[in-house]
Amino acid sequence: MFKSGFVAIIGKPNVGKSTLLNLLIGEKIAIVSHKPQATRKSVKGILNGEDYQIIFTDTPGAHESNKKLNAAIIKFIDEALEDFDVAVVMTDNNGEIDEVLEKYLEKIKQKNKKAILIINKIDLMSKEEIEEVKKRFIEKADFADIIETSLIQSYDAKEKILNSILSLLEEGPKYYEDDIISTETERFIIAEIIREKIMNSVGKEIPYHTAVVIDEMKYREEKGIYYIKANIIVERKTHKMIIIGKNGQLIKKIGQDARIDIEQFLDSKVFLELWVKVKEGWTKKEAMIKEYLDPRF
C-alpha cells in the first residue's frame, strides 16, 4: 500500500520547526536560526520513500503582533491549515500557548484532523516540566501521539517522528516526482540561505527589517559556475552600515558562509555578489512586503 498526504508543522517561533523539516527531508530547504521567527512564509518539503510520499509545510512561528509584516506572515499559516491531513504541533521547554497558537489548535480540533504533539528540547526540562507542557496542550487539542525528544541530540528523533506520521497517513497517490524535494524555487531557497546568515551574524532587531531578493542567477557552463547577484534590503542607512561592517568584513563573512551552503544545495561552484539597498519603512508598506516576503520567480 502506497501512503501519501500533507503534513502541516505549526508552533510558536524558535521551537524547532525548520530544524525538523530539514531533518526529515535530509536537505536544507528551510532556514534555521537561534533567533525566533526565522521563517516568514510556509515552506514545502517533499519526502519520498519506497511506499510513501509526504508533503510537509513548515509554517512561520505563530505569535501575536499588530505589525503589517506579521499580518502577512499569519496569512501563510492560515493557508497551510486550509488543507492538510496531519498536523505536527511543536513546542519546547517554554511550552507556551498564546492566543494565536490556541486559535490554530482549535482549528485542528474543528476540522477533526489527526495531530501529533512534539515536545522538543527535553534535555532542558525535568520530568515534571514535560508533564506540565503535555497537560497544557492536551487541554487544547486531541493528539494521536505525543513524542518527547531533542531534535539536535536524539539519534532516533527522525525515525520516531516519521513512523508516527506514517501510522496516521492513509493510502493515496504520488503527487510529485521522486527527484523533487521542495515546491520552492532555487532562487527562493538561495535567498533564504543568505537571510539565515544575516540573522546569525547581526543584532536582535536588524534581521526582522531585512529581506533578500535574488537579482540575477546564471549558470556559466564554460566555467562550470553559478553567478548569483543578491540584494539585501534594509530599512535604514544605519542597518546597511552594520551589515556591511568595518571595512566590509561582515558582509564578506555573510557571503562566504552563504556560498558554502549554496554550493552544497546547487552541487556546483558559486560566485556570490551581495549588495545592500535601503528601502525606508518597507516592513510597513504592503506592496513592498508582498514583493520582498515571497521572492519567488
Image (cartoon, rainbow, N blue to C red):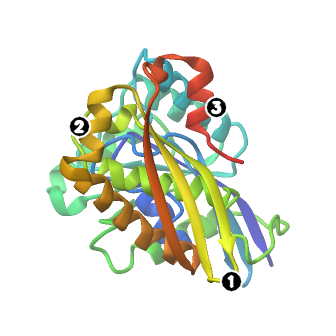
The reply to whether dot 2 and dot 3 touch (C-beta < 8 Å) is no
Q: Which of 275 and 23 lies nearest the eye of the viewer?
A: 275
Residue at screen point 26% across, 52% down: 248
Left or right: 172 as drawn, with respect to 27 = right
| Mark 1: amino acid | Glu
| Mark 2: amino acid | Lys
Label 1 to label 3, Cα distance in Å? Answer: 57 Å
Q: Which of 46 and 262 lies nearest the eye of the viewer?
A: 262
Q: In the structure shown, which secondary structural element does the residue marked by tag 3 occupy?
A: helix
| Mark 3: amino acid | Gln
> Which residue carries the number 1 mark?
222
Mark before the other along the chain sequence, 1 or 3: 3
Label 2 to label 3, Cα distance in Å? Answer: 37 Å
Q: In the structure shown, which secondary structural element does the residue marked by tag 2 occupy?
A: loop
**Location of residue 43 with respect to 47 vertically, above or below:** above
Left or right: 101 as drawn, with respect to 227 = left
Q: Residues within 10 Å of mark 3 (few under 14, many from 20)?
A: few
Q: In the structure shown, which secondary structural element does the residue marked by tag 1 occupy?
A: loop
> Which residue carries the number 2 mark?
204
Where residue 110 is drawn, which disc sits there? 3
Q: Which of 25 and 242 lies nearest the eye of the viewer?
A: 242
* Mark in the foreground, 2 or 3: 2
> To which quarter of the image does residue 280 belong?
top left
The reply to whether dot 1 and dot 3 touch (C-beta < 8 Å) is no
